[in-house]
Image (spheres, grey):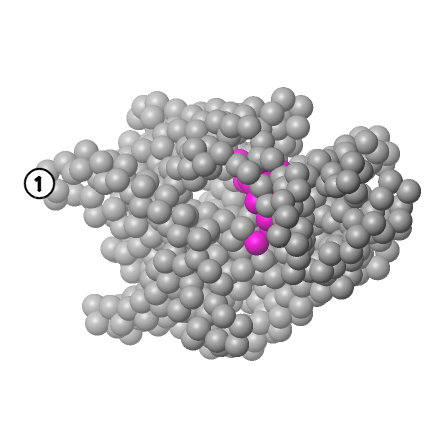
């Protein structure tokens, strides 16, 4: 049980007023229960959709790994970029509660639009300039791709050196194609591709209104100095994962058993329930998340129209991302930055302006203590980028690893789908969040609780350790080049513990260290750091890309070796950066002036 009363704290006084109505829920303000459920249903929709997205792009639209991982990274980046704008709008005009309701309804429409994916794309292969239709033999335990040439079905087999062998029915090599001579592709509906991008655009816009402001309302439930705040955010964070836990089982199940539309449709229903919980809250949230006082006119309609206009802007960014050519080899970092898509340039420029401009602003308008607290928050936000870059491989490279190089049988009783493996993270969060909440409170009462920078350092090292554990597991892969699903579960166990050291603590940290009148903006910058991480995560996942034909890997050994090499590299990097943060954490603690 979490602590039920506010304790004394060394936090400095602040003009940011927050209150509770005196009623409690597990020792916390009663309103936390409704916000907990609202966030749980919103996350039900989002993570149900996310569990399907990478597989949907590779298996339905038949995009290659480069395009899929780039688009997935761009989408999740925008999901975390738009809260920067949504937080500012709520702070200045709309208020958090209206923003949450509007964002929920826009996202629900986006999920419904994803239901209309049209016919599955048809694969083909260009072999030495000649087009061949690709067929897929689904007999046996794995799919086999073939082309029809000379009246024979020639099986496509990728080789370690990048060449492609076309195997005759008797297993002999009928033809060897140089790497440059084999180019897979697919015929897909232009209309339905556009519709899919419009749906993703609606989700990103709606999320911008929802995501930062539901957390801001939670923060307003606690007065400054109330040590229940970290525990409250941990409980709130458990709600996030409770919703995603069930959706990551049910949505992939429906996608396989019924069709993609059913999985996305269930996500949309979850999102509508989230909207209803706020829309029909009555007096339960009265006085929380209201528009700022002193406004002479209601600008809600103008803001809503602006959000509608933003949808085609997001669509344009997705199209530009998909069509931006890679930087030329040898062009260096400058060439890479100049070669980024418009989305990439906007992300990194906005983040750079934020991490430089906000401290300068706080130095000008605040006192020394406020400036140092804001600087501590900014430094931790920068380290946050590394954590989420690696953690968010879950929806891209780790999902594809599950699909291609993981034996998904569970004790021989049933077989999971690749999308359902993301359930492990949510399950471990739900199971471990109460323990972490109790642990932080118990350590805090004894004065042993590690500071926020130390928790961040532990989280960074943990995410690296998780990847190294999976790399260890690849040494035990079977002759089919697949590892047991329990190695993937081990990675998610370690990653979940690392996540609990950063994410709920980070949300709480923003509300405690920020100057009062920009707390919504700072919450947006927190999500902006995750946005940049998502974009970079897409780039990292692209490094782990392997050759596919018709959505299927042509050489599972090459696939396994590629994933193991990338995961080992990023695991070692994460542990090193965690060690660096640990070294400087003592200086950061002084800047935080007693905030725990």
Residue occupying image coordinates x 41% and y 48%? 318
State yes or no: residue 58 in magenta: yes
Residue occupying image coordinates x 51% and y 30%? 117
Residue 176 visible (yes or no) = yes
Question: In this orientation, which residue lies closer to the viewer: 42 or 12?
Answer: 42
Q: In which quarter of the view is residue 93 placed? A: top left
> In this rendering, would 472 be left or right of 494?
right
Magenta extent: 49-66
Residue occupying image coordinates x 16% and y 43%? 293
- The location of residue 201, given as percent across then percent down, is 39, 41
State yes or no: residue 537 in magenta: no
Query: Where does label 1 land, which residue?
Result: 296
Q: In which quarter of the view is residue 516 placed? A: bottom left
User: Magenta stretch mostly in which secondary structure?
Assistant: helix
Question: In this orientation, which residue lies closer to the viewer: 265 or 278?
Answer: 265
> In this rendering, would 41 be left or right of 22?
right
Tag 1, which secondary structure? loop
Label 1: how many Cα within 10 Å (few below 14, some 14–19, many 20+): few
């Amino acid at each position: 049980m979490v602590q039920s009363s506010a304790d004394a704290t060394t936090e400095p006084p602040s003009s940011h007023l927050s209150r509770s109505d005196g009623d409690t829920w597990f020792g916390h303000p009663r309103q936390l229960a409704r916000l907990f459920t609202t966030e749980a249903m919103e996350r039900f929709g989002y993570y149900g959709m996310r569990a399907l997205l990478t597989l949907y792009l590779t298996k339905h639209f038949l995009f290659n790994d480069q395009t899929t991982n780039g688009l997935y990274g761009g989408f999740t980046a925008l999901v975390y970029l738009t809260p920067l704008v949504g937080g500012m709008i709520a702070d200045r005009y709309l208020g958090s509660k209206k923003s949450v309701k509007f964002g929920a309804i826009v996202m629900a429409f986006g999920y419904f639009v994803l239901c209309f994916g049209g016919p599955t794309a048809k694969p083909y292969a260009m072999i030495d300039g000649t087009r061949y239709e690709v067929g897929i033999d689904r007999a046996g335990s794995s799919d086999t791709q073939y082309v029809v040439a000379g009246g024979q079905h020639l099986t496509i087999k990728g080789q370690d050196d990048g060449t492609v062998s076309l195997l005759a029915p008797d297993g002999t090599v009928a033809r060897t194609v140089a790497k440059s001579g084999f180019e897979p592709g697919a015929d897909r509906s232009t209309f339905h591709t556009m519709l899919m991008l419009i749906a993703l655009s609606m989700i990103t816009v709606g999320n911008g209104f929802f995501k930062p402001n539901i957390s801001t309302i939670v923060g307003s439930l606690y007065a400054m100095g109330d040590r229940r705040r970290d525990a409250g955010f941990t409980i709130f964070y458990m709600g996030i994962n409770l919703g995603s836990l069930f959706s990551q089982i049910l949505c992939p199940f429906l996608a396989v058993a019924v069709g993609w539309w059913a999985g996305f449709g269930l996500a949309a229903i979850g999102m509508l329930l989230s909207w209803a919980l706020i829309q029909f809250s009555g007096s339960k949230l009265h006085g929380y998340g209201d528009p700022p006082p002193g406004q002479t006119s209601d600008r809600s309609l103008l803001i809503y129209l602006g959000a509608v206009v933003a949808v085609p802007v997001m669509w344009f960014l997705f199209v530009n991302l998909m069509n931006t050519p890679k930087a030329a080899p040898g062009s260096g970092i400058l060439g890479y930055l100049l070669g980024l898509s418009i989305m990439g340039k906007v992300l990194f420029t906005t983040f750079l302006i934020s991490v430089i401009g906000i401290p300068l602003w706080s130095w000008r308008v605040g006192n020394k203590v406020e400036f140092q607290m804001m600087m501590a928050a900014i430094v931790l936000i920068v380290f946050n980028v590394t954590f989420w870059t690696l953690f968010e491989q879950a929806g891209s490279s780790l999902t594809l690893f599950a699909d291609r190089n993981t034996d998904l049988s569970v004790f021989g009783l049933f077989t999971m789908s690749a999308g359902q493996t993301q359930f492990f993270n949510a399950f471990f969060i739900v199971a471990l969040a109460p323990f972490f909440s109790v642990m932080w409170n118990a350590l805090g009462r004894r004065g042993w609780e590690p500071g926020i920078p130390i928790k961040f350092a532990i989280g960074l090292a943990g995410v690296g350790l998780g990847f190294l554990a999976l790399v260890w597991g690849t040494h035990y892969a079977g002759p089919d080049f697949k590892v047991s699903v329990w190695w993937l579960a081990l990675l998610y166990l370690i990653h979940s513990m690392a996540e609990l050291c950063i994410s709920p603590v980070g949300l709480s940290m923003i509300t405690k260290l920020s100057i009062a009148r920009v707390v919504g903006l700072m919450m947006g910058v927190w999500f902006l750091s995750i946005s940049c991480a998502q974009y970079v995560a897409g780039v990292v996942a692209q490094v782990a890309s392997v050759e596919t034909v018709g959505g299927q890997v042509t050489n599972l050994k090459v696939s396994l070796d590629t994933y193991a090499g990338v995961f080992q590299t990023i695991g070692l990097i994460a542990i090193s950066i965690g060690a660096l943060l640990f070294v400087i954490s003592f200086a950061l603690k002084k800047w935080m002036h007693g905030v725990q």
